[in-house]
Amino acid sequence: MKRLGILFFVLMFALVSLAGCATSTVDIGIVLPTKDEPRWVQDETRFKDLLADSDYSVEILFSQGSTATELSNVETLISKGIKVLIITAQDGDAAGAAVEKAKAEGITVIAYDRLITNTEAVDYYVTFDSIAVGEAQGQYLVDHATGTGNPLYLYAGAASDNNAFLFFEGAWNVLQPKIADGTFVIENSSAAVGLQANATLTRTQMSTILDQVTTNWDFNTALSLAQTHLTAATVAQKGDVFILAPNDGTARAIADAFTADTAVTSYKITGQDAEIASVQYIIDGKQSMTVFKDVRTLVSDAITMAVSVLDGNTPTTTGTYDNGSIDVPAKQTAVVVVQQSNVTSALITSGYYTASQFTFPN
Ligand code: GAL
C-alpha cells in the first residue's frame, strides 16, 4: 500500500512536470496591432532579425485592428506559458482587459510603442519620444512658411491610440504660436479654430479636434477626409498649403488628394515612420519629411527588458509615463527628422535600408 502510494506520487509528479513542459513552449509573446499598417510589419521584421539567434522562444501574433482578436492572442500566448508579454495595443484603454489577464498569471507586461492606459497591469513601457515626433512635424511646417495667411490643414491618428494625442500635442506646441500670430490659418477644423488661442489643450479639447480630423491611421479614411476638405474649401483656402499628416501612410493618401486638386499650387506635408513607400515619395518630392523612428532600437530595448526579466533581473528604465492609473517605468528613444537632403545619411548609411530599395533620380 505504502509502495503504491509512493508510486502514485511519483507518477503524479511526472505528469505534472510533463504538463508544465507542454504548456510552457513560448518564453516571450509579442502582440502587434495590424499588418495593414506598414509600420508594424517593420517591427515584426526587426523582431525576427534580432531574435534569429536567441536562446529564448518567441511568438508574434497580429490583432488586425480588433481588440477581441488582441484578447484571444494574449490568451493563446498565456496558454503557451509565456513569461513576458510585449504588446502594442490596438486600443489603449480596451487592452487593459487583456493585460490584466496576463498579469493575473504572473506574466510581466511590456507596453510596446503605445501606452496601455487606465490599468495597473503594465510593468514597463518602451517608446519613442512621441511629443518630439509631433514637435518635429510642426517645426517643419513652421520652418517652411513665410508671410501670413498660409492655409493649414490638420490631420491626426486614431483616438483609441494614446500616441495620436501625444503627436498632436507636440505639433500644437509648435504650431499654435504661429496660428496665433497669423502665419497659418486653419482651414479644415472648426474645433481647432475655436481653440486656436489656447497654447495648451486638455485631452478633452484635443478629442474635439480629433473627432473632426482623425484618419484612424487608415489610408482610405485619410484620402476621403482630405477629398471632403478640399471639396468644401474655396480656391482662396488652397494655393500654397501646409499639411500636418500624422504618419506616412496617411501622408501619402492625403498628398495624393492634394496633388489631384488643381487649385493647390504647392504643398508641404509631414509624415512619420520612414516607411519605404514614403521614403520614395520624399525622394520624388511628393512628401516633404518623415520622422524616422529607428525600430531596431525599440525592438532591442523591448527584448533587453524581456531577457532581463527572464533572467530574474530588474530592467533598466529612464523615466516614467502616467497611464492614468500608475506611473509606468519607461525607456524612451529619440527620433530623427528625414527630408530629401538626408535620406541617404539617415536611412541608408545607417544600414536601416539599402539603396537598392529606392529609385534615385539620375
Ligand atoms: C502609432 C505609432 C506610429 C504609427 C501609428 C500608425 O501609435 O507610434 O509610429 O505608425 O501608430 O500605426
Image (cartoon, rainbow, N blue to C red):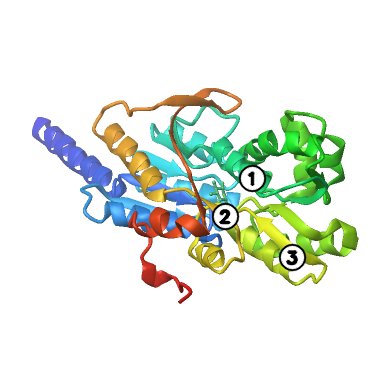
Q: Which residue is mark 2?
A: 289
Residue at x 48% of width, y 74% of height: 361
User: Is the C terminus in the top left, top right, bottom left or bottom right quadrant?
Assistant: bottom left
- The kind of residue on which mark 2 rests is Met
Q: Is residue 161 at all visible to an observer of this figure?
A: no
What residue did someone put label 1 on?
143
Query: For the residue carrying disc 3, how many other residues have a C-alpha within 10 Å: few (<14), some (14-19), or many (20+)?
Result: many
Question: Which element type, helix, strand or loop, lies under badge 3?
Answer: helix
**Distance CA(mark 3)–CA(mark 1):** 21 Å
* Residue 26 rendering spot, x and y as whole percentages: 31, 48
Number of the label disc, if any, that sits on residue 258: 3
Q: Quadrant of residue 222?
A: bottom right
Evaluate whether residue 207 shows in this view: yes
Q: Contact (CB < 8 A) between labels 2 and 3?
A: no
Residue at the front extreme, as displayed: 147
User: Is disc 1 surrounded by few (<14), some (14 to 19) or many (20+) residues within 10 Å?
Assistant: few
In the rendered image, the vertical position of residue 103 relative to residue 164, given as above or below: above
Q: Label 1, secondary structure: give it.
A: helix
**Amino acid of disc 3:** Phe
Amino acid type at circle 1 is Asp
Circles 2 and 1: CB distance less than 8 Å? no
The one of 66 and 233 positioned closer to us in this rendering? 233
Q: Pick whichever of labels 2 and 1 is earlier in the sequence.
A: 1
Quadrant, the N terminus: top left
For marks 2 and 1, give the CA distance: 12 Å
Q: Secondary structure at mark 2?
A: strand
